Amino acid sequence: LLGRASLLVSAALKEGRVAPTELCQRCLSLIKSTKFLNAYITVAEETALKQAEESEKRYKRGQPLGVLDGIPIAVKDNFNTAGIETTCASNMLKGYISPYNATVVQKLLDQGAVLLGKTNLDEFAMGSGSTDGVFGPVRNPWSYSRQYKEKSVPKSHSEDKDSNWVITGGSSGGSAAAVSSFTCFAALGSDTGGSTRNPAAHCGVVGLKPTYGLISRHGLIPLVNSMDVPGILTRCVDDAAVVLGSLAGHDPKDSTTIQDNFKPFELSDLTDVSKLSIGIPKEYHAPGLSSEILALWSKAADLFKNAGAKVIEVSLPHTRYSIVCYHVLCTAEVASNMARFDGLEYGHRSDMNKSTESMYAATRREGFNDVVRGRILSGNYFLLKQNYENYFIKAQKVRRLIANDFVKVFGSGVDILLTPTTLSDAIPYMEFIKEDNRTRSAQDDILTQAANMAGLPAINVPTALSERGLPVGLQFIGRSFQEKQLLTVAKWFEKQVKFPMIQLDEVKRHDHGVFQHQKSASFLEHRT
Amino acid sequence: LCLWGHPYLNSIFLLFFFFFSLTPWVPVVGLEIHAQISSNSKLFSGSQVQFAAPPNSLVSFFDASLPGTLPVLNRRCVEAAVMTGLALNCSINKKSLFDRKHYFYADLPAGYQITQQRVPIAVNGSLSYSLCIDNKMSQMVTKTVRIKQIQLEQDSGKSLHDDVRSQTLVDLNRAGVGLMEVVMEPDMCCGEEAAAAVRELQLILQTLGSSQAVMAEGQLRVDANVSVHHPGEPYGVRTEVKNINSIRFLAKAVDYEIERQIEELESGGTILNETRAFDSKLGCTVPMRDKEGKQDYRFMPEPNLPPLILYNARSLPANMNHQQVVNIDWIHERLPDLPSVKRAKLVEQYGILPEHSFTLLNEAGLTEFFEDVIKQTQMKPKKVIGWILNDLLSYLKQHSLTVKESPVSSFLLADLLNRLEKKEISSTAAKQVFAELWKGEGKTPLEIVKEKKLQLIQDQEDLERICQAVIDGQENEVMAIKSGNRKVLNKLIGLVQRETQGRSNPVLVKQLLEKKLSE
């Protein structure tokens, strides 16, 4: 049951085949037995059970609040949750309890969802591995799957059996791991440069980055305000549509959200793709793209072509400037956004009390890790009066060019772009930390970031397992506010590829009898 | 040529030249004025705005910069700024932008202030103000100062330094309150001009209701930029004078600073580009330790606020909710009369002197009081204004009361003036009645007149009898008058007045006496 799509579970709840409290209990105990994944920073056991009890009462009265009533969910620890610690995986906010709920959290609660806890991330979401938070790295559940174990051959018997575990990607690695290991049915992430789609790809789950302005950012502790969007991580595309429907729309507390009303939609099964035009941006054939993923990408393109869709190569010429442009814009906003953490109103405050200035300096040195401090330093450099024109203004102009590339391509009749989400499958932690955060972020965001620059909706759909038995995903990028079209195509694709279900012993133990193997035909096997 | 050859004119010319070579300085004064917007809630949050509330009782999550909070622009503040911009003849930018200005300070919780550095809401305006020459109300000149821009921005909180306990206490009640920063070009040249310009601005803001502009409550804060230079040369290095909390001090501070700079330069010194504070006790400006010394504010666009778009009747989208748009034309049509227009109307409508119109507007509520009296009395406005300015206003000043607090209402004054106009009482008696009314004992003018027996003798026969008695008793004076010394008649009038205890109409008495003497 835990491995099912939330829509199916919702039906089970409705029919009384499972009670919300039972579902919640099962998730909580699975969280405990998968603690080694380090997916959660805070598990809100008590409030979760209370919420489940409330939900149960509603079901008993026959008045559930909707599809999400009683569904256990998790939220990335950079969303404010009233009464539950919100840390951003930083010493700066360790122990910080917000007095209010982020709008997205409130909306989920209002619809009866059960909040299990807060998931791990890179400190202040700055990273692409979920390895750089004060609570330690998140482990990819697939590291412990039968699929991975079978294919990875230990180099020697003396080698620590545990050292082979792979990263989740990031920065929403905790949320991706939580959904992937069946400890919750859906999770919120955030996506600034790929932080939802990247870990979704590495953990084999659906990761949706909606159009900028479609979902409220109020209560999301910002990384880059002009690019941040709450992300949605689920097991399947249908679930993503359900969660999107419950979150999207204008929020009076976020002036950058759309004014128009948003109508939640149900995804229909696409039977005919012949009217679709799929664009394959050649620039996404980036240096470092693994041959495995390249092959998968072209197979996916063939899949559309064979089904009758028009598949054309397109060009987004400014994409190659995306990383450097992002670096300037991101760090500048980081420098600004982090200014409020001065130890006065909330969060960590240093004991240093020689002067206000020295207190600020010590507080920020103790509170932030090197990555955060490095970005603050760069950002302030770019914002200096003598540098502003040369860096910030230029970067903004380049951003406009990048966005215009998309406008042109979509204007030429292309409906959806198909690209890889990541350059390769997840790499072992020991491998990952050989490079610093900045290098990794620059590499890993390369295929995802342009969508943030342009504010476009994009989704990772788990596609196949790599030779090492790890998930690989592909990305679809849609037109602004055309989530319905994007998700419909993603759903069609999802159905074709039949991504295999993770086989975890822990899940089996907790969900015995109900846990079922899905047909394990992977996309690769299916096509070859 | 002929004129220049004139020995007298020549010497004037020389004197002129000599005078200028001794004081070859041109002072230049520009002002930056922060006016607190009169609004129920703050610029970007829903917290209330209130003066002297308990510390930190008016602080929303956003005001305290809690992580994840976002600014939401207060429509009322935008309207107030548009109104002010229109009143100051500015062009209103249909699209303006918000920026972040960064600096670390305890009373600035976010580490930046949201302001409008690049494209402010209003630009290129002007303000006309009048001032009198040599302190003579009758010689007024009108001057104009250009308004560079009006920008919307957040106020900071307040830091209170407790040196004894080496603590700083922070009150965030003011943090996030909406301000309009009005930037005036350096078109003024002395303290008096600066003061007159600010006073006119203050009146305009109060008329619009866009700011209460009470300086003592910090709702209007003025920083003066002062420099001096030789004619024909570029402007000198300027200093910025802060901490000016009254219009009187503004004039003093600016004049002091001009003198100081001239003395400094003439004694071979240089002027530093520094911030100085005005010490009202010592009457001088002193260097101020800058909050954090010279710094780079690292301006950046505020990413959480879309551009502020304003509409006019033409550009107003048809399908837009009226609650969500600000229509410049709509605001323009509803602008109240500005002080300059009000003054002109007063002069034209009531035939009063221009300087009287200034006095009327300078005192809050006085114009309304004046007009109320006019409505309720038959007395000519020209005469009423005398009572308002000479009697009512001087009583108010003496007792430090506002017009609202006056114990004599417009109704009572009108009643009194009507009795004077109907010649029920003399003007001397009227002054007495006014003094009684001021006591605020709830008596009507009629009651006072009766009580004090102040009514004029209406019975002509009575009056004739008294006049005859005076004539009979003053043979010498009568002789003098009859021999042509008309001045002596006044003495007789005085005697009749004394006899009647001021209850006789001097004009009538004069007529009666003349008639009797010519018999």
Image (cartoon, helix red, strand yellow):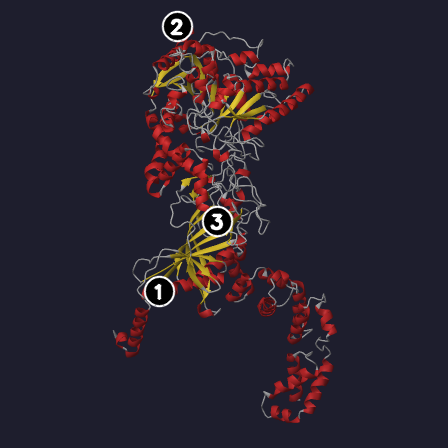
Q: Is residue A272 above or below residue A77?
A: above
Left-right relation of A219 to B99: right
Depth check: give the residue in front, A63 or A159: A159
* Element marked by disc 1: helix
| Distance of label 2 from label 3 (alpha carbons) | 69 Å
Give the residue type that dot 3 points to: Met
Q: Are marks 1 and 2 on the same chain?
A: no
Q: What quarter of the picture does the C terminus of chain A occupy?
A: top left
Give the residue type that dot 2 points to: Thr
Point out residue A420 in the picture as x, y percentages from the top left corner: 39, 18
Give the residue type that dot 1 points to: Ile
Q: Is residue A367 above or below residue B197?
A: above
Residue count near mark 1 (Cα–Cα under 10 Å), binned few <14, some 14–19, many ≥20 = many
Q: Chain of mark 1?
A: B
- Asked where in the image residue A131 lies, by quadrant, the reply is top left
Point out residue B15 in the picture as x, y percentages from the top left corner: 31, 74
Q: Is residue A163 above or below residue A81?
A: above
Depth check: give the residue in front, B197 or B332: B197
The residue singled out by tag 2 in the image is A528
Residue at figure coordinates x 35%, y 28% from the top left? A323
Point out residue A176 in the picture as x, y percentages from the top left corner: 48, 21
| Distance of label 1 from label 2 (alpha carbons) | 91 Å
Q: Which mark is residue B41?
A: none
Earlier residue among tags 1 and 3: 3
| Distance of label 1 from label 3 (alpha carbons) | 33 Å
Q: Which mark is residue B262?
A: 1
Q: Is residue B49 above or below residue B284?
A: above
Q: What quarter of the picture does the N terminus of chain A occupy?
A: top right
